[in-house]
């Protein structure tokens, strides 16, 4: 695609496969699913800490791409232990967005995620 910009950031969140952190097409930004890797490459314990880390990684990619959290229009959440983690993940996730300004969202249970993580989140943003 001629007008696509493929963002890969040396100082962005850890990457575990061949992909871009985000792809920008015109005013749209498609952020690759982020895993809960801390700056040192480790994964924190507990779904709350993992959710917070994923959100911070999304913020980092948005910022490095020149977008803002308020521009997120769609979110997909993937959980390996859906029933056990859904409510606790939501308690942390809800803090990302102002009340009444929640993007569209899909949340599904999956059998496994890369690096044995419990959560992965991807987003789409539009300026």
Image (tube, helix red, strand yellow):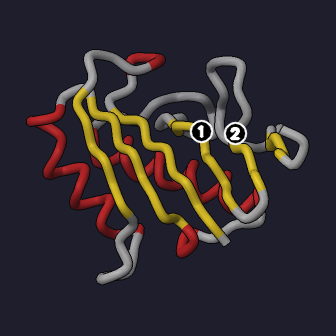
Residue at disc 1, secondary structure: strand
Under circle 2, the secondary element is loop
Residue 81 to residue 85: above or below: above
Q: Which disc number belongs to residue 32?
A: 1
Instruction: Identify which residue is drawn at 75% across, 51% down.
Output: 24
Quadrant assignment for the C terminus: bottom right
Give residue 66's mark. none
Asked if the residues shown at circle 1 and circle 2 are in contact, with their CB atoms under 8 angstroms apart, the answer is yes
Q: Earlier in the sequence, mark 1 or mark 2?
A: 2
Residue 37 point in image, percent of width and height: 53, 34
Q: Which residue is mark 2?
A: 21
In-image side of 83 versus 103 (left or right): left
Q: Where is residue 31 shown, x and y percent of the image? A: 61, 46
Q: Residue at x 55, y 54 (%)?
A: 124
Residues packed near mark 1 inside 10 Å, few (<14), some (14 to 19) or many (20 plus): some
- Which quadrant would residue 14 be assigned to in this image? top right
């Amino acid at each position: 695609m001629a007008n696509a910009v493929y963002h890969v950031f040396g100082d962005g969140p850890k990457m575990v496969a061949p992909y871009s952190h985000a792809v920008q097409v015109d005013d749209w930004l498609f952020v690759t699913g982020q895993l809960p890797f801390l700056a040192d490459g480790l994964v924190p314990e507990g779904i709350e800490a993992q959710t917070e880390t994923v959100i911070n990684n999304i913020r980092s990619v948005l910022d490095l791409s020149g977008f803002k959290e308020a521009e997120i229009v769609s979110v997909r959440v993937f959980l390996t232990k859906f029933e056990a983690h859904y409510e606790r993940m939501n308690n942390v996730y809800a803090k990302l967005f102002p009340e009444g300004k929640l993007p569209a969202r899909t949340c599904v249970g999956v059998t496994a995620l890369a690096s044995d993580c419990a959560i992965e989140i991807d987003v789409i943003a539009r300026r």
